[in-house]
Amino acid sequence: MKSAFVCVYLREIRIARRIGGSGSMGVVFFLTLVTITPFAVGPDPNLLARIGPAILWISALLASLLGLDRLFQADAEDGSLDQFHLSQTPLELAVLAKCAAHWTTAALPLALAAPLFGLMLQQDGAALLGVVASLLAGTPALTLIGAIGAAATVTLRRGGLLMALLVLPLAIPVLIFGVSAAAAAAGGSVPFLTPFAILCAISLAALALCPFAAAAALRQL
Amino acid sequence: MTSAHRPHADLHSALALRVEGLCVARGERRVVENVGFVLAGGETLKITGPNGAGKSTLLRALAGLLPRSAGAVALEGAGEEEVALQTHYLAHADGLKAQLTVAENLAFWADYLAPAASAQDFSARGLSVAAALAGVGLAHVAGAPVAILSAGQKRRVALARLMVAFRPLWLLDEPLTGLDAASREKFGHAMREHCALGGMIVAATHEPLGLDEARELRLGKRPPGAAS
C-alpha cells in the first residue's frame, strides 16, 4: 500500500495533468509579464541586464499565485476536504502533499522556463544560473506561504484577490533574498551563497511551519 | 455481494455509538439541541424532520466536522480511536474528482481511508474497487472519467466508497438522492449487509430507507411560526 502522502501527491499530479493548462498557463503568464516589462522601462540593454533578475522574480511571484486560490477550494466544494478530516492521516500531511504537487506542476515549470525568458532580458550565463537556482530554492516558500492564504480564503467564492493580498506581504522576504541571490550570481560585491543560504532557510522554515498553519485554517471551516 | 470474505466482522460487533446531550450552534443559533441516543452494533437510526431542522448539522457534528458546543459522542468498544476514524461520512458533495476515472477515485479513497493497520492486516480493508463497483452496478464505467457520469451514477460511485474501506459507522446524508429503484434495492442490500457485520448506520432522509428495523429520531419539533 502506498503511503498517504504519495497517494495525495499522485492524485493531485494526475488531476493537474488531466485539467491541462494550469501549469502551462502559469508559464505563459510568466512570459507575458517578462515580455511587457521592456515596453514599460524601455529597451536599453544595460538597464534590462541590471533589473533582469528582479523582473524575472516579480513575474515568477505573480505567476506562482495563479491557481493557488483553487488549492483547497476544489476539495472543499466537492467534499474531499471532509474526507481528509476523517482520515487517520494528519491533515498537515495532506496539505504538504498538495503543496508539493502544486509546486511540481505550477512552480517548477516557472523555474525551468526562467533561463529562456532571461535571454530576452540580456542576462548572461551566470545570471541565468543564479535566477534558476534562486527560483528553485525560493518557490517552495512561495507555494507554502500561499497555501496559508488559500486555506484561509477557502470558503470565499471570489477569494483569489483576498488571497493575493494576504500572501504578497508575507512573500516579501522571499523576494528580497531571491533577487539578491540572483543579482549576486550576475556579479556584485555580495557572494552568491550569502543571500542564497538565507533563501534556503526561509523555504525550510516555511516547510516546517506553513502546513500546520494551513491545516489549522482548514479546521476552522 | 457476499459477506463470507470479511472475517473481521466479529471484531466490530461489540461496538456502540453513545451520544449524550449533543448541542451544535451555527453562529448565534442553536441548530441541534440536546440530542441523545445509543446505537448498538447492527442498528440503523433514521433521522427525519423538516428542511432546516438540523439533520445535516447533526450528522456533521457526529463526524466531528463541526464543533460541538455541548455533549459527548463516543464510539464504545473501538479502543482509543476517535469516532472520526471509524466513520464514513456521505453528504451531497460526494468527494469525487471529475477529471479522474471512477476507478482512480475509488482507489484513492480506498488507500486514504483504510485504517493504518490494514497494510499488514488485509482483512481490515474493504472490498476491492472492482467488487465495490460491481456492487453498485457500475463495473462497466470503471475506466470512464467521473465528469461524464449522470448525477445518479455519481451517487452510486460515492456509495461504493463506503465499501472500499471498512468503517463501522456510516453517517449518510440523503443517501438515496438521484438513485433509481434498482439502485435503491442494491444499496438497501448493502446497508443490511453492513448491519449484519455489526456496523451502524445513521441516515438523514425524507424517504423510506428500505430497512424495516430502522429506529427513527425526529428533529425540529418547534411550533409552527417559531422559525428562529
Image (cartoon, grey):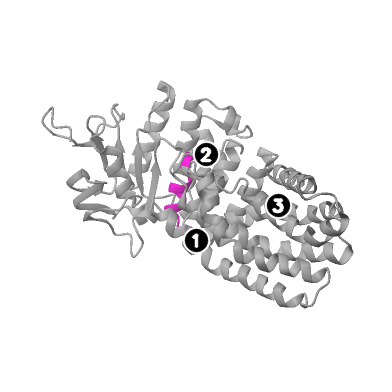
Instruction: Between residue A43 and residue B42, name the one nearer to us.
Output: A43
Identify residue for label 2: B96
Q: Is residue A204 above or below residue B205?
A: below
Q: Where is residue B159 in the image (x, y as percent from the top left)?
A: 45, 37
Which residue is depicted at the point 35% across and 33% down? B174
Q: Do the residues labelled 2 and 3 touch (CB within 8 Å)?
A: no
The numbered mark 1 sits on a residue in which chain? Answer: A
Above or below: residue B30 compared with residue A94: above
Residue type of the residue flagged with mark 3: Ser
Chain under label 3? A
Query: Mark 2 or 1, which is nearer the eye?
Result: 1
Disc ID at residue A59: 3
Estimate the x, y position of residue B181 in percent, counting from the top left: 40, 21
Local crowd size for mark 3, using a 10 Å CA cut-off: few (<14), some (14–19), many (≥20): many
Image quarter where the N terminus of chain A lies is bottom right
Provide residue A221's location: percent of width, then percent of height: 39, 50
Q: Give the range drawn in magenta.
A: A77-91
